[in-house]
Image: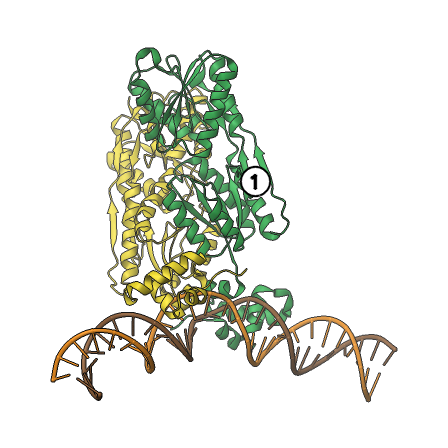
Chain colours: A yellow, B green, C brown, D orange
Amino acid sequence: MPVAQVRDVAALAGVSPATVSNALNHPAKVSPETLARIQAAIDELGYIRNDAARQLRAGTNRAIGMIVLDIANPFFTDVARGVEDVLIDEQRPLILGNSAQEPARETTYLDLFEQQRMSGVLITPVVNVIDRLRRLRDRGTSVVLVDRMSRVKEFSSVSIDDRMGGRIATEHLLEIGRRRIGFIGGPAGLAQVKTRLAAARKAVEQHGSGEILFAETDSMNAQAGRDGIEQLLALPKKQRPDAIFAANDLVALGVLQALTLAGVRVPDDIAIIGYDDIDFAASAAIPLSSVRQPAHQMGSAAASMLLDVIADPAASTVKHLTLKPELVVRRSTSA
Amino acid sequence: MPVAQVRDVAALAGVSPATVSNALNHPAKVSPETLARIQAAIDELGYIRNDAARQLRAGTNRAIGMIVLDIANPFFTDVARGVEDVLIDEQRPLILGNSAQEPARETTYLDLFEQQRMSGVLITPVVNVIDRLRRLRDRGTSVVLVDRMSRVKEFSSVSIDDRMGGRIATEHLLEIGRRRIGFIGGPAGLAQVKTRLAAARKAVEQHGSGEILFAETDSMNAQAGRDGIEQLLALPKKQRPDAIFAANDLVALGVLQALTLAGVRVPDDIAIIGYDDIDFAASAAIPLSSVRQPAHQMGSAAASMLLDVIADPAASTVKHLTLKPELVVRRSTSA
DNA sequence: GGGGGGTTTTGAATCGTTTTAATGCAACCT
DNA sequence: AGGTTGCATTAAAACGATTCAAAACCCCCC
């Protein structure tokens, strides 16, 4: 038994396929009685439209694609939920891809989105993909950058001020009297890492005393935190840090675990501050100080912005929204 | 400038569109020289195939859809990553939908997957959707249930033994001398909740002493944990629980926070055991005992199973793989 | 009764790819 | 030489919806 198509629905309702299509896509054009008859026929046959055919003819896919850096990081799932909450009201499906910070995966998803002729894409890029994004845009797919300002200012973006975040975290550590600050995160090329690290260095410089020790990692999870702190603990005692600025909370939690295991007292011997303020930061063994980012808000703002661009791609005013992070002090830096 | 199509590629390479299509889909059928010429043309034009057209003609979408209960729960993102790791090798995109335990959202995603004629769907259902799944299957979409055994045994599934999990958690609490066990989770209709709760009740019964107090919540996050424990603390002192069995770790962490805030000592006054053993359980303020579930493994097993079904839907042997959970004892139940 | 204006419905063309069956061509066998 | 085999290529017919221009219909007024 083949599945029902518009023509079957049309036959059952006693109208032409064109009318069925109108009923589905432009209900205002169809008289109420006909509409009801068609709806009845649809229900009876269990008709589900073939989206490939629809898309081919209509030339547009309603779905929105999103590529996040790390689906295992609650920060990004918060962002994704912010996006979802906006899109669900618009009846637009969200296709969520996880690049896991791997350029190859990122490319795979970009290919996919391009093949699917998505109407819009939200992306937190791993590497420089401006040319890919440009091509997407030329093909009619709108693009908004998330948590990353385009250097070339060519695409709209929503981001959170990483410079400020890096500064307030570092100033806080300096204020509580720490001078040798270990920065753990990576890879160094990642925009978020680069900016936060640079801001930390600048803060130290302006303060006039102190030092940043950079332990680069190849990803940003708890394991990376454990690896990073190991590097720093391997230093001669005199050179060891008295505070850690972790590039995100997952890393910070890894650091905390490793330090506890090694018998290092937190915050007495080494203070720790994380980044993101994910829910788990507050409930950690030693509640974690962090730089809170309005993740959910960033997600919904990005989604709204994308919908605006989709609605009118010609209105070529590129917008950049920058949200502010906020210092949250907990026990891991209270000394 | 309109985007390049097969016919443009064909013209540039001096062949027919059919040959280009063959080059793309059945490279063995095309001579090496022609292949090279076509590839060159594709690169030169930056040709990206229109997937809607491909799908319409080929009748099949390579993508796999997945619907999870809660994207904010690390357990499910672990499962998703297990799935992803298998699919990426097969060059199959994964479309991830979050039902957030809301039937309406679940339906929205099922509609979407049906419209898209997905080749396969992985789902952890919120409510009974057997008829929807049956329809999907009849339309040619393979289905595998995740973390949920189909009562009707009609679909293959991969799950983790919830009865055993509920039992070992409860027995552990009984062994450390607790008798009044509060079970927090919900909604009560959710299969995982139902099974774990039933197993807990049975364990108490077999033990001959003890009691289960069920505090039902409408979701399974930290907030639910705080709400649930509030219900139980409102009981007259004599009737209050001396242990909590939380239906998952997020709930357990919420309970832990609320108890700490209320000045209740954990585990002395009330012991807590969670479920899932997400990474954050170990690094909680008071490290959380839990029932470890092999999430990543379940994901990859489910994906492999789905690929098998897709490869040969006729081979009608429905398979059920049940993985075993494992008790992990930490400080929250050590007394 | 004919004409005008507005709404509703429809026939036919179309979206861009894959597929099928057929063709062309060269080499090989007897 | 004639016939066969096999490979590479192609023309043309799908796939299932949407769209557009045109037809049909309705109601009302002159």
Which amino acid type is marked by label 1?
Answer: Lys
- Nearest the viewer among B325 and A109 is B325
Asked which quadrant contains residue D21, the reply is bottom left
Q: Is residue A180 found left or right of C6 in the rendered image?
A: right
Q: Secondary structure at mark 1?
A: loop
Q: Which residue is mark 1?
A: B153
Q: Quadrant of the C terminus of chain A?
A: top left
Q: Position of residue A317 (x, y in %)?
A: 24, 60
Is residue A7 something that shows in the picture? yes
Q: Is residue B308 left or right of residue A215?
A: right
Q: What's the chain of the residue with tag 1?
A: B
- Residue B155 % position (x, y): 55, 44
B189 vs B2: above or below:
above
Task: Give how far across and how far down residue B157 sits, in percent.
Answer: 55, 40
> Relative to B118, does residue C19 appear above or below in the rendering?
below
Can you say whether A331 is above or below D3 in the image? above
**Would you place residue A217 above or below residue B89 in this image?**
above
- Residue drawn at x 61%, y 65% is B27
